[in-house]
Amino acid sequence: MARILVTSLPFAGHVGPTAAVAAELVRRGHDVTGHTGAKYRGRFESVGARWLPWSQARDYDDARLADTFPRVGGGKGIKANFANFTDILLGTAPGQAADIVAARAFDLIVSDQLAFGGVLAGEALGVPWASVAVIPLTLPSRDLPPPGLPVRPATGRLARWRDAALWPPVRLATRLTIEPKLTRVRAAAGLGPAAVPGPDGLYSPHLVLAQGVPGLDYPRSDLPPHVHYVGRLASPPTTPGELPAWWPEIETARAEGRPVVHVTQGTLDVDPDDLIRPALAALADSPALVVCTTGGPPAGVTLPANARAAAFLPHDQLLPLVDVVVSNAGWGGTLAAIAAGVPMVVAGATLDKPEVARRVAWSGAGIDLRTGTPGPAKVRTAVTRVLADPGMRRRAADLSARLAAAGGVPRAADLLEDLAGRAGT
């Protein structure tokens, strides 16, 4: 039995995969502690793990980020993205590390890739740590352009020259803007400069559990051997709970040959003006049944006659009944849709979402609207195109099979146990 810490930023999309891994490790008999904010304490305790609170790390509610981090504001735009990185990811990291170091008694740290405190604590304690990638991999590759830029992988000589020209200024900008901040954060945790400079040094050199599979993520001929694609990290389907009274209408629509379109903005970017209202307007006169989840109370959203809404719905029950998902390109929701074999229309604009949207389009399993605030006409055209193209559904089904074959949570636990065993020898 190993003493394992699983640490996660208190965001729903981060806690989901890490808590699923924690549950499997508990089931296998390990002594597991979850380290996250108070809001998600129950997600770890409910699976049999102990909870290590964010005491020295500044805790927050992911639904009210601006209350704790005013510079994040509404979460949109370059300034908000930069504040998210500096104030939340970097700003809370020394406190996270201090919490973990004070607890001390761990054989292995399993860290949400963006919970940088797990990296710092692993180094400070001399304990091996593994990274759980909760967003698409951003590791550099000779086969890819720099992450974060609005370009897809090269397919010809000109594009390869483009990528070669893009890397030097990106590396220079990283060296001038990001590395000094990382050095200060490391110093606050009592550590010297990183062996690997820049954000790449925040990935574990021991084990990286990458959600997704090649084909949905970009191909890399130089993928490090300690990086493993494990498919989707999610808890097993839960016992069906209470569903809304209108739920049987989904089966009725399917029996009548009407398409079912699911519209969601996930749990973080929940301003209905971004995607929900445009999508409802786009599909109001269509024969589709539109099933909308709002991520919270659907205040102020007027539903057309062919739409139904709820704050949340169980994806494991809903997605197998859906023909198209319209989303804001969160990685967790994208993996859920593709795992169900459902093609997508994605509108991503903040944080990692444009990277996710580009991957969906590149994979052939959906359409990238290339904006986070599309107009109704753009949504309507994309949904119509996906419904008329069986190739996208076949591609989503193929990727679904690949995700399942990658092993998911059991495969991740196998790799973690192997790392813990090697560390103990």
Image: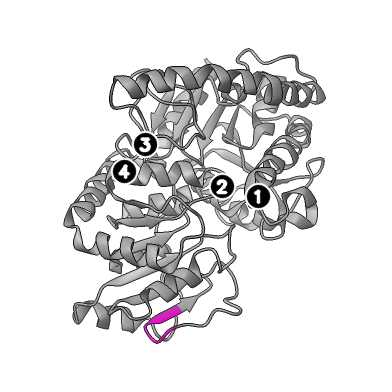
Give yes or no for contact between labels 2 and 1 (Cβ–Cβ under 8 Å): yes
Residue found at x 82% / y 40%: 56
Residue 170, image x, y percentages: 57, 23
Query: Which dot marks residue 10?
Result: 1
Residue 225, image x, y percentages: 40, 19
The reply to whether the magenta stretch includes residue 350 is: no
Query: Which dot marks residue 2?
Result: none
- The answer for how far apart the CA atoms under marks 3 and 1 are is 25 Å
Q: Between disc 3 and disc 1, whose residue precedes?
A: 1
Q: Is residue 160 left or right of residue 384?
A: right
- The answer for how far apart the CA atoms under marks 4 and 2 are is 19 Å
Residue found at x 72% / y 49%: 72
Residue 19 appears anywhere in the view: yes
Which residues are the magenta region?
A: 304-308
Q: Is residue 174 left or right of residue 327?
A: right
The residue to which callout 2 is attached is 14
Our reading of the magenta stretch's main secondary structure is: loop
Q: Which amino acid, by three-letter code, is at mark 2?
A: His
Q: Which amino acid, by three-letter code, is at mark 4?
A: Leu
Give yes or no for contact between labels 3 and 1 (Cβ–Cβ under 8 Å): no
The residue to which callout 4 is attached is 403
Q: Which amino acid, by three-letter code, is at mark 1?
A: Pro
Query: Which dot marks residue 217?
Result: 3
Q: Which amino acid, by three-letter code, is at mark 3?
A: Asp
Front one among 83 and 19: 83
Considering the numbered disc 3 on the image, is that residue within a helix, a strand or a loop? loop
Considering the numbered disc 4 on the image, is that residue within a helix, a strand or a loop? helix
Front one among 92 and 17: 92
